Image: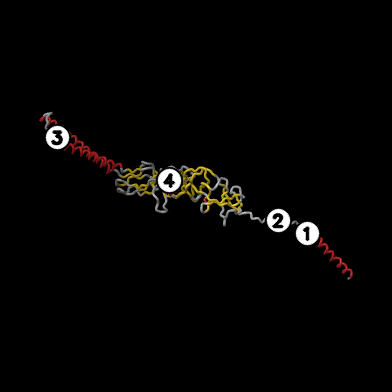
Amino acid sequence: MKKRTARRAFLVPGVIIIGIVIMAVLIMGRRPPEQVDDTPSGVLVDVFPAEKKDQDILITGYGEVAALHTVNLTPQVGGKVEWVHPNFLAGGVFNKGDELVRIEAADYELAVQQAKAAVAQARYNLEVTQANAEVARTEWELIKGANSSDKPNSLVLYEPQLRQAQANMQSAEAALAMAQLNLDRTLLRAPFNCRVASENVSPGQLIGQQSVIATLFSTDVAEIEVSLQPSELAYIDIPGAKVDVVLNLENGSYHYDGYVEREVGVIGQMGRLSRVIVRIDDPFKNENMNNPALSIGSFVETRIHGRMVRDIISVPRTAVRSNNQVWVAQDSVLTIRDIDVYYKSDEVVLINSGLESGELVVLTQISGAANGMKLRPMLPETGE
C-alpha cells in the first residue's frame, strides 16, 4: 500500500512537467499571425477602351416587304375561258408577255371580218365619190372654161359627198381597229415579271369584263417603308444609302442588300415619324442557298448606313448616363465626365468631345457612384 502511494507521488508531478514542456514547445513553434490588409480593394467593373476611328452612322428601322406593283388581273372582253396556263396558280412565276389565259375568240374573229367588209365598202364609196368629183369638175371647166372667174357650187363638185365618204372610211377603219383590238384582248398576258398571289379562273368558265380573275405582284423590285426620326434623315444620303435588310427567323438571321430609294416626304400621324423607302433588287430569287427568298409581307429589320464620320469615338449606349455623362476609370478611380454627343442610336453613341482615345469607359452600373470611388477595371478581352 505504501509502495502505490509513493508511485503516485512521483507520477503526478512527472505528468505535469511533461505537459508544461509540450506546451512550451508549441508556444515557441507557433507562427506569428499574418497581417491582413483591410484597405478596400475597389468595385469590380467592366470597362470599354475608347478609340477614335472613322465610323459610319448605322440607323435601325423596321418594316414590311411589299411589291413595287400589285394588280388585279381583269379581262377587257368577256367570253368563255378556252385555255389557262398550267402554272397559273398561286405562287406561279411568269415573265413579262407570257400567255396566261385565252378567251374563246370566235365571236371576235367574226367581228374583225365584218369590220374588214365595212372598210372595203367605205373604200369603194370613197373611190366612187372621188371619181364623180373629178368628172363634175371637168364638166364645169368645159362649160365655163378653165379661166372662168365663176366659182361652182360645192354640191356641183361633190365636195360634201367627198367629205362624207372620207369620214365613213375613217369610221370603218376605226371600227376595224377596235375589232382587232378586242380580238387581241382575248389573250391575257403577264403585264410585267410577276408572281401569282391568288387566282380564280378555270377552263370553260364564263367571265365578263372587269371580272377579277387573279392578283399579281411584280418580282423585279421589292420595297420596304421604314419610319425614322426626322432628325435621322440628316445623316442619310437619299437616294443611294446602303441598307442591310435582315430577316429574323427561328432558325437564324438572313441578310439582303438594299438601298434607300426615296423619302416619302410626309410625316406620319402615328409617332410623327418620317418615312423612307428601301428597295431590294430581285428579292424573290433564291440564288444564294443560304438565304431563303423573301416573301411579301415579311417583317424585316433595316440597318441603314449613314454618312461616314471621321475620327470620332463610339461607345455602347449603355455606357452613357443621364445628362450626357460617362464614367471613366482613371488610375482605378472613378471620374464622371460630361460629353458632347454627335449622334445617338439604340446601340451606340458617337461622342464629339469629353473623352479621349485610350481612356477606359465604365460599362457596369454602380449604385451611389461618385468621383474618386475606388475601382477594379476589367477589360472584356483579357479579364481582370
Is residue 285 visible in the rendered structure shown here? no
**Sequence-earlier tag: 2 or 3:** 2
**Sequence-earlier tag: 2 or 4:** 2
**Sequence-earlier tag: 3 or 4:** 3
CA gap, disc 1 and disc 4: 85 Å
The type of residue carrying mark 3 is: Leu
Image spot of residue 151 (x, y percent): 12, 33
* Vertical arrangement, residue 7 with respect to residue 195, above or below: below
* Vertical arrangement, residue 156 with respect to residue 257, above or below: above
Task: State the residue at coordinates (57%, 57%).
Answer: 368
Which one is in front, 62 or 274? 274
**Sequence-earlier tag: 1 or 2:** 1
**Sequence-earlier tag: 1 or 4:** 1
CA gap, disc 2 and disc 3: 137 Å
**Which of pointers 1 and 3 indicates the residue nearer the eye?**
1
Tell me the number on the disc at residue 278. 4
Which one is in front, 211 or 380? 380
Which residue does the numbered mark 2 point to in the structure image? Answer: 35
Which residue does the numbered mark 3 point to in the structure image? Answer: 157
